[in-house]
Image (tube, rainbow, N blue to C red):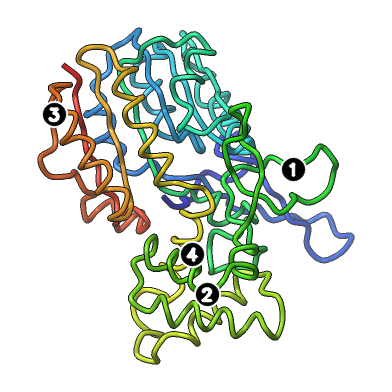
Amino acid sequence: MTKRKTSKGKGSGRGSNSWKKQNGPRKEFVKVEFTRHIPVLLQSVLEQLDLKKGQIFVDCNLGDGGHSEELAKLMDGDITIAGFDLDQDAIARAKANFEMAFKDLQKKPNIIFINDNFRNLTKALDEVGVSKADAILYDLGLSSYELEESGRGFSFKKDEPLIMTFSNKRGDESEGEMSDAVVGAGEDGTDSVQFTAEDIINDWDEENIRTIIESYGEDKFAWKIAKGIVKARELERITSTSKLAEIIKQSVPSFARFGKTHPATKTFQALRIAINDELNALNETLPQAIEKLNAGGRLVVISYHSLEDRIVKNFFKKFEEDEEGKILTKRPIVPTEDETDINPRARSAKMRVFQKK
């Protein structure tokens, strides 16, 4: 998941046009490139979904809408798409992208936007009248926008507040900055705000921090990092991504500070997974997805780290043992070298496909 350069200027349909004034009052402007998420494994996804015109597709991670957009074009607009995203900003971006992308289609696709967590798949689809689907896609990675422009602290490469929540819903209706929050299922089934990465880093004890980094980041230096965090927060509260990344870097052995992967990578992954309860959500949603598929329908999942992939692999194996259908990918489909050259964030992607009988 990464950014791509798009056409400059008015009417590109790839996001908001941005113009930067230069040199005071002079009316001179320069066009600025903006970003859009590149759909990972796009051609493979379109092939494996195996959809026909007039069918129903569920996109469980809508994001900028890249996969859904290309699928709708392939179907000449003759398709119904139900797109999930917990982030209201993502839904707004997808709507804007679709408006431009589909303006020349004679038949407009039926798009249903669902601002909810995919762990609520059955309930949310039932509420919008989707009883069954012909294909369901999960793309479990972060979008370029979330990493580079959301301001929620997903990346250690930018100096941002330690939030790391997928949802941008506030804890109250007041204006101003997003409250310290995290996604969690409330009693009414909606997503409520509970805690952020800043809360974990500053308020949780060393053992719990270590457990998170060890379990969700699989980092062999988890105990050193947890100890370094607790020591650093005694001096001042840790509130930014850059501060946390530097603490992690100083906590690991010197030989681990300058490798191909930044030493903060696994800790940031672990915090994001813990805050958004990602693994439990995946465990909850996959059985619902199988139930929602029509006979012959396909379930396609793209994961980006071993914890997710293991869950998907085990569920697919169980579905096959229970005679729900068959696994179509004995080995996961991975990006080609050409794709990873264009889109480096795709390099860890693994796609598995299951077909319901």
Q: For mark 4, does the 10 Å Cα neighbourhood hold few (<14), some (14 to 19), or many (20 or more) residues? A: many
Image x and y of residue 245, in percent: 54, 75
Q: Is residue 341 above or below residue 54?
A: below
Asked if 82 appears above or below 281 in the picture, the reply is above
Kindly identify which numbered label has been placed on residue 171: 1
**Seen from this angle, which residue lies furthest right?**
25
| Residue 98 left/right relative to 296 | right
Mark 4 secondary-structure assignment: helix
Residue designated by label 3: 320
Residue 87 lies left or right of residue 339; in this view the side is right
From the image, tell me which residue sits under label 4: 268
Residue ID at (34%, 90%): 255
Q: Secondary structure at mark 2?
A: helix
The amino acid on which the numbered mark 4 sits, given as a three-letter code, is: Phe
Q: Residue at x 67, y 83 (%)?
A: 234
> Which residue type does callout 1 highlight?
Gly
Q: Earlier in the sequence, mark 1 or mark 4?
A: 1
Residue at mark 2 to residue at mark 3: CA–CA distance? 41 Å
Please tell me which residue lies in front, 91 or 165. 165
**Earlier along the polypeptide chain: callout 1 or callout 3?**
1
Q: Earlier in the sequence, mark 2 or mark 1?
A: 1
Residue 168 picture location, percent across and down: 66, 43
Q: Quadrant of residue 28?
A: bottom right
Give whichever of 171, 1 is nearer the camera: 171
Q: Residue at label 2?
A: 206
Mark 1 vs mark 4: in front: 1
Cβ atoms under marks 2 and 1 closer than 8 Å? no
Residue kind at label 2, given as amino acid type: Glu
